[in-house]
Image (cartoon, grey):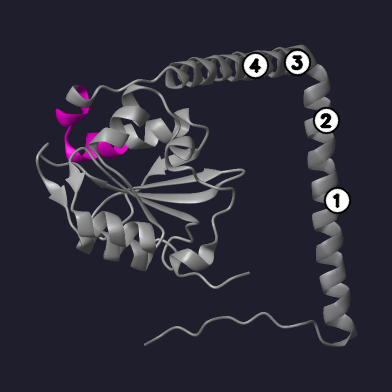
Amino acid sequence: MARRRRRWRRPRGTTELLAAAVVALAVLVWLARAAETAVRAAARNWPVLAAIAAAAGVGAGVWWVRRRAATRVRAGRLAALRLSLAGIDALGDQEFEFALRDLLVRDGWSARKVGQQGDQAADVIGQHPVLGRIVLQAKHTKVGAKVGSQVMYQVKGTAGPAHGADIAVVVTNGSFTRDAKAWGDKHHVHWVDRDRLRLWAEHGLTLHDLLRLPARTSRRGLGRPAA
């Protein structure tokens, strides 16, 4: 047989109200005594508590300094990042996406790798205070292989609507078909082929200079309604 759930109800009548008041007063008295006991214990042991607090503060300070130092070291390394085409050709698909993320960070973007199954044609997403939001679709392939127009269609269809991007770029260590480049130029989907990748990764030219990206590219060009 199922047990009935108890329901709390408000006190009724003078007797129940007085009983509730007595219980509440007893709870308050107990809390006050517990607080007083805690304060007395802290007063008796304040040197120990002070030492613990000081140690915690020192530990937090050391952690913060080390983290800042590590961040500066990583930023310095990324600022000098150069990747050869031969090295890029030897990467796997996932490693290629991480490399593109690092190149964006080097160029001043806040970037993260997002590529996985069902990524809606976005492998790296970056944010720039002036240029806006960028989506990179990475196509790591054989040197002689060509990326076709179908990839451009996919990126065009998802960069703005699915990812809120201002800028869409397809990057490959191979090349693009003539139709793919023409379609991308017409529909605001940028492309980076092997020659452009050499300038970006190996020679250190920033992506926004390489592609001549304007500040806050119109989202209307990526399928987003104008603000």
Quarter of the view holding residue 117 = bottom left
At label 4, the amino acid type is Gly
Q: Which residues are magenta?
A: 87-98
> Closer to the N terminus: mark 1 or mark 3?
1
Q: Position of residue 92 (x, y in %)?
A: 16, 35
At label 1, the amino acid type is Val
Query: Cα distance, mark 4 to mark 2?
Result: 28 Å
* x 82%, y 80%: residue: 16
Residue bearing mark 3? 50
Query: Cα distance, mark 1 to mark 2?
Result: 15 Å
Residue bearing mark 2? 39
In this view, the mark in front (1 or 3): 3
In this view, the mark in front (4 or 2): 4
Q: Quadrant of the C terminus?
A: bottom right
Residue bearing mark 4? 61
**Tag 4, which secondary structure?**
helix
> Closer to the N terminus: mark 4 or mark 1?
1
> Closer to the N terminus: mark 3 or mark 2?
2
Quarter of the view holding residue 184 = bottom left
Query: Cα distance, mark 4 to mark 1?
Result: 40 Å
- CB under 8 Å between discs 3 and 2: no
Tell me if residue 108 can be seen: yes
Task: Give the side of residue 138 with respect to residue 188, left or right.
Answer: left
In this view, the mark in front (1 or 2): 2
Answer above or below: position of 225 versus 214: below
Q: Nearer the viewer, residue 198 or 115?
A: 198
Tell me if residue 119 can be seen: no
